[in-house]
Image (cartoon, rainbow, N blue to C red):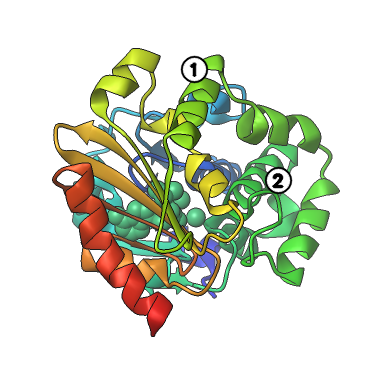
Amino acid sequence: MIDLIKECSAAQNIGISGHIRPDGDCIGSTLSLCLYLRKVFPEKRVDLFLEPYAEAFQDVEGIDAIDHSFQGADHYDVYFCVDCGKDRLGDAEALFDAAEKTINIDHHISNKNGCGDVNYVEPEASSASELVFDLLDPGYIDAKIAAAIYMGIVHDTGIFQYSSTSPKTMRIAAQLMEYGFDFSQLIDKTFNEKTYHQDQIMGRALLESILFMDGRCIFSAIDHKTMEFYDVCGKDMEGIVSRLRETKGVECAIFMYEYEPLTYKVSLRSCGKVDVAKVAAIFGGGGHVRAAGCTINGTVHDVINNLSVHIEKQLEG
Ligand code: AMP
Ligand code: MN
Ligand code: MN
């Protein structure tokens, strides 16, 4: 466990970042950490740099702390990399590399050794937000900080249902609820609610999904033209792969979208038999046993052919 207050006490400038294409856990963990450090150390500069987030997060309390410029202090005494290894920091990687001291808080098995001078990496944890909670002095937590952590946990556990949800996760959630925030609205606004365009693209992806390997695998792909037609970007397609995984009989689900010509962002989900972190790692990606991602160049058929060899090996092994 890291003593956050001790690690930061000598610093003047503190930076925080999470992964590219930030999700709910990435936003919740970095935002709560930022709000907390600003409260504990009002005299210090604490910057939070993340790429633009989905519209669904715009009403989260304190969200204005997030800066998309990646242009901060000349130098950071401490830099936090949260919910990923440094290879997924995007524009923040240079800030992280230049910092005096680096701290990594993560729960990805693909980053189990950590990338910081100081590391708190627990692959068993439901979320990076849960790990941030471990490190906070409860005396400084308020409703805003609690809500951000709660949101991160909700997003990475699919509202407390994925297997990464532990009794500890539930105890933390219970403690957070005591701070008093509208958890029901937070879940609806940031997790459940979809725009009309998101509904349309989900429908299209499900309609065109294809079962293979005797119904044990399913995939769906959205090409760039289709993304333009429905006016959606990557952030709008969160949730599709989880829905595919819930198809009866399916062990492994693949969803991909073409974010650049012949370059697909691939999301993998498993019911537990297939370790998709291992599959993603073969293609330079990573993640967790049951949820992982990577980027693969080629046509949809190339991507499926490449992935299915490794999935089939595991299903048969
Ligand atoms: P996604 O399918 O993008 O929602 O990602 C599923 C999980 O895998 C999340 O925990 C991501 O943070 C992680 N992940 C996605 N892409 C990568 C990658 N290229 N490298 C490492 N982890 C990834
Ligand atoms: Mn994440
Ligand atoms: Mn996470």
State the residue at coordinates (33%, 14%). Answer: 229
* Residue bearing the label numbered 1: 197
Instruction: For marks 2 and 1, give the CA distance.
Output: 31 Å
The correct choice, above or below, for 92 with respect to 104 in the image is above
Give how far across and how far down residue 261 sits, in percent: 14, 32
- The image shows residue 35 at horizontal and vertical percentages of 57, 41
Amino acid tagged 2? Ala
Task: Tell me which residue sits at (32%, 62%) in the image.
Answer: 102
**44 or 103: which is nearer to us?**
103
Mark closest to the chain's N terminus, 2 or 1? 2
Between 98 and 44, the residue placed more toward the observer is 98
The residue lying at 30 percent from left, 17 percent from top is: 228
Q: Can see residue 1?
A: yes
Determine whether the residue tagged by mark 2 lies in a helix, strand or loop: helix
User: Closer to the camera: disc 2 or disc 1?
Assistant: 1
Quarter of the rendering containing residue 234: top left
**Position of 150 compared to 258: left or right?**
right
Residue 52: quadrant of the picture = top left
Q: What label sits on residue 146 in the rendered view?
A: 2
Percent from the top left, x then y, of residue 153? 63, 52
- Where does the C terminus fall, quadrant-wise? bottom left
Q: Secondary structure at mark 1?
A: helix
Which quarter of the image is occupied by the N terminus?
bottom right
